[in-house]
Amino acid sequence: MYLNTIQPAEGSTHAKRRVGRGIGSGLGKTGGRGHKGQKSRAGGFHKVGFEGGQMPLQRRLPKRGFKSLTANSTAEVSLKDLDSIAVDQIDLLVLKQAGLVNTNIANVKVIATGSIGKAITLKGIKATKGAKSLIEAAGGKVEE
């Protein structure tokens, strides 16, 4: 086998469309571009979303929503995760050392997912109403 003998499989390719080659081709005269206008001309280019000078749709519509600046610095921890920690006094540093929250986290909230079987004390960590009641039922307390 030589590189100059390699050919595509039979029927896998077809002839390129030849525009502007006479009336018999079906794509003669205007070459499938229609009549007049920017898109019919050579080099008739415009940006994506350009509407001929009319105010584009993406600029006519109002901006919506917002991006929270604190979303990346807040984390949730479940009761099940707290039960797996061997320490009784739990604060943000303990959670970071245990690998439960990322190092760039500033605020943590405990949610009532799972159960807790030991008495723990939360310091500087918020808890939902349900999580707080479950921690206190197990003999622990929440100090915010």
Image (cartoon, rainbow, N blue to C red):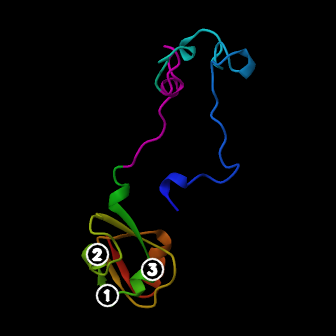
The range drawn in magenta is 48-68
Q: Nearer the viewer, residue 88 or 78?
A: 78
Looking at numbered disc 2 in the image, what kind of residue is underneath it?
Lys
Reply above or below: 9 against 30: below
Which residue carries the number 3 mark? 79
How far across and how far down the image is residue 45, in percent? 48, 21
Q: CA distance from mark 2 to mark 1?
A: 15 Å
Looking at numbered disc 3 in the image, what kind of residue is underneath it?
Leu
Q: Is residue 56 magenta?
A: yes
How far across and how far down the image is residue 65, in percent? 47, 40
Which image quarter: residue 122? bottom left
Q: Earlier in the sequence, mark 1 or mark 3?
A: 3
Which residue carries the number 1 mark? 88
User: Circle 1: is it few (<14), some (14-19), or many (20+) Cα within 10 Å?
Assistant: some
| Relative side of 118 to 55, left or right | left
User: Circle 2: is it few (<14), some (14-19), or many (20+) Cα within 10 Å?
Assistant: some
Which residue carries the number 2 mark? 96
